[in-house]
Image (cartoon, rainbow, N blue to C red):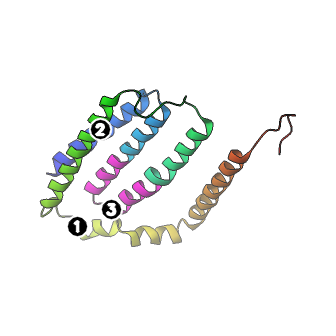
Amino acid sequence: METYAFVLLAVLAIATALGMILNKNTVNSALLLVLNLVSIAGVYLLLQAQFLALIQILVYAGAIMVLFLFVIMLLNVDEEESLFDKFRIKYLVAFLLGVVIFGQILYSLGGVTDMLPEVSSEMVQIGTVEAIAEVFYTDYLFAFEMTAILLTAAVVGALLIAQYKVKDSGETE
């Protein structure tokens, strides 16, 4: 079962990465990147790295992608188009694929007993939240705090850029 889950997640990750690169629409590319990040989080779960999977979803697929979409919408890169004007078939295919994936998730949750191999106690201690937090707040505290400050500065900068308006005479407010 683990092998099938890995193959499914690996194929999904490769397909979404290729789709992201080859897609001309920036919003669709960003959404494919979210799906890619979710599939990578699934691989982390198969590796018994629950903390990394959770952080992958919360930080990358959540916060960072919201910033990406904010910048895409702020720059107004693509022309406006109605949601259902083009390619109605792709919405049907996406819905059917979502139903299939949801069914596979329910099936794997139903047979969760002995789905993953046993992991040694030393390996479990490495991937826990407590072990990672201890390293973050002792050895890498300065880098952790600098990252928080840089992310805060990036959000403030994005807000300032979004509020920047040019007057008709060329002066700025």
Question: Is 96 or 140 nearer to us in this picture?
Answer: 96
Which percent across, then down, holds residue 45? 29, 57
Type of amino acid under label 3: Gln
Above or below, 90 against 36 in this view is: above
Asked whether 54 falls inside the magenta stretch, the response is: yes
Label 2 belongs to which residue? 94
Give, as a single range, the part of the protein colored magenta. 38-59
Q: Is residue 102 left or right of residue 53?
A: left
Distance of mark 1 from mark 2, alpha carbons? 39 Å
In front: label 3 or label 1? 3
| Residue density around tag 1, few if under 14, some if 14–19, many if 20 or more, within 10 Å | few
Secondary structure found at label 2: helix
Secondary structure found at label 3: helix
The residue at the point 34 percent across, 64 percent down is 127
Distance of mark 3 from mark 2, alpha carbons? 28 Å
Label 1 belongs to which residue? 120
Q: Is residue 153 left or right of residue 137?
A: right
Q: Is residue 151 left or right of residue 28?
A: right
Asked whether 103 falls inside the magenta stretch, the response is: no
Secondary structure found at label 1: loop
In front: label 3 or label 2? 2
In which image quadrant can residue 106 be found?
Answer: bottom left
Which percent across, then down, holds residue 24? 46, 26
